[in-house]
Amino acid sequence: MRFVVALLLASVSAIAQTPVTDAKSYVKYDQPTIVLDHVRVIDGTGAPGKPDQMLVIANGKIQSIAAAGQPPAGAQVLDLSGDSVFPGIVGMHDHMYYPAPMRNLALYPEHAWSFPRLYLAAGVTTIRTTGSVEPYTDLEIKKEIDERKMPGPKMHVTGPYLEGQGAFTPQMHQLADAEDARRTVNYWISEGVTNFKAYMNITRDELRAAAEEAHKKNLKITGHLCSIGFREAAALGIDDLEHGIIVDSEFAPSKQPDKCPPQRDIRDTLLKLDIQGEQVQSMIHDLIAHHVAMTSTLPVFEGSVPGRPPIRQANLDAMLPEARQAYLNVRDNLNKNAAQSQAPASFKKEEEFEFAFAKAGGLLLAGLDPTGNGAVVAGYGDQREIELLVEAGFTPLEALRIATYNGAQYLGLLDQIGTLSAGKQADIVVVKGDPSKTISDIENVELVFKDGIAYDPAKLVKDANGFVGLK
């Protein structure tokens, strides 16, 4: 017995003495002055890339960008011939959770270990969580990242879902009325969240109340809606809408006030809609007139399309074996029933809608939404979102602008991040190749700078692999 007790005490002591891995252990370059030499600069504005440039970083900021020449004395010079740089990705629908591999209960465990590492490794330097199931955990993760105790992107934390009666997961509080919505928003503002998200069963009175309270503090509210149509939400004061027309219920013939119609009705109506027709175009122009942004989350919908997305081994390697198998099983079932699937047509409608919204002058944002059937993993999904924007009709340069400039603009941070120019924070992604010509080159991440510190993507990925689906 004494031996067992001694063994247990030794084990506890060993655990207690194990050092916590902090952000510093993932840093590759942290010199006072770093020069990215002979690199192609894609600045995020939509302008063509400039080859053979010299970008100088010091004090966490970009000091200068000019034609390659004589580097400053004493600088750490990185010869990046053949590489490109673009601004750090601003992920605008980037949860810190992922679906549990069980399928009989909708639960979404927080991924405080793997997701911060995977986001940063993929070049995502800023995120909005866009709905939290563990807002206190998100706030603590943000604190750990800000203090450089944990690697990860800069976080803009969204409060808990503002959901009405009928939530599909026990992880969501269900609002009782408008006063409950006001109380909830004000409480979480006092706790430090900076964004809010309305959800599928919220009522109009609850949304109006929530938007009013958020706006009093100059904060914004977005929504994944169903009980309220897009134009109703715009009139009630919403600032952003998630997912696009694929979730908009306003055209469904069975729609009743404050009620979410059957999902089949929304889908069937979408398939009949003409994106270029008066109904949809009128809605687009109404949203733009109300200054309502739209967040694209194409990867989560692509996961329901048979034969898609293309299998990416890195994505599978990140998963817990049980989570990987659960996803592959769902994928196999989708492929077996491909002939009956309406998902390909719905997906194409969504792509067409997002292109039309942006071309009409709407502010389109980029996200991934790591939910659904498990196809979407932090970081990898952000890269896939940009690739899918190109599939939707945007040029690679336009897609990169949506994923960088537009997100920074919405967050009110365009003077700090979102483009590459002198004086801005050095949030920079270094990739092999030229994503302004071949968008899939965004997957070839070699370095990720956040505030002028270069992180090692390979090490971040290595330590995250095998944990998605668990933590």
Image (cartoon, rainbow, N blue to C red):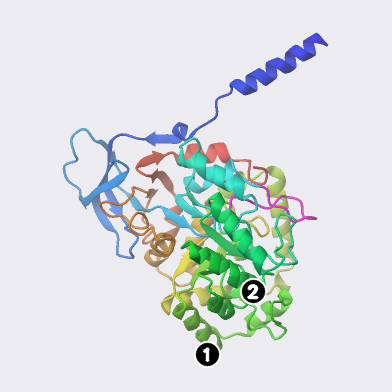
User: In the image as oriented, which residue stretches furthest toward the top?
Assistant: 2
Q: Is 446 within the magenta?
A: no
Relative image position of residue 218 (x, y in whole percent): 46, 63
Report the span colored magenta. Answer: 95-109
Picture disc at residue 205: 2
Relative image position of residue 169 (x, y in whole percent): 74, 58
| Residue depicted at x 64% and y 42% | 471
| Residue depicted at x 51% and y 42% | 143
Could you give the CA–CA distance between mark 1 and mark 2, rounded to whole angstroms?
Answer: 29 Å
Seen in the picture, residue 418 relative to 447 is either above or below; the reply is below
User: In the image as oriented, which residue stretches furthest toward the left?
Assistant: 70
The residue where tag 1 is placed is: 278
Q: Earlier in the sequence, mark 1 or mark 2?
A: 2
Quarter containing the N terminus: top right
Mark 1: amino acid = Glu
Q: Nearer the viewer, residue 71 or 258?
A: 258
Residue 232 seen in the figure: yes
Q: How many marks?
A: 2
State which quadrant residue 317 falls in: top right
Label 1's element? helix
Label 2's element? helix
For the stretch drawn in magenta, the main secondary structure is loop
Dot 1 alpha-carbon crowd within 10 angstroms: few under 14, some 14 to 19, many 20 or more: few
Mark 2: amino acid = Asp
| Residue depicted at x 61% and y 74% | 246
Q: Nearer the viewer, mark 1 or mark 2?
A: 2
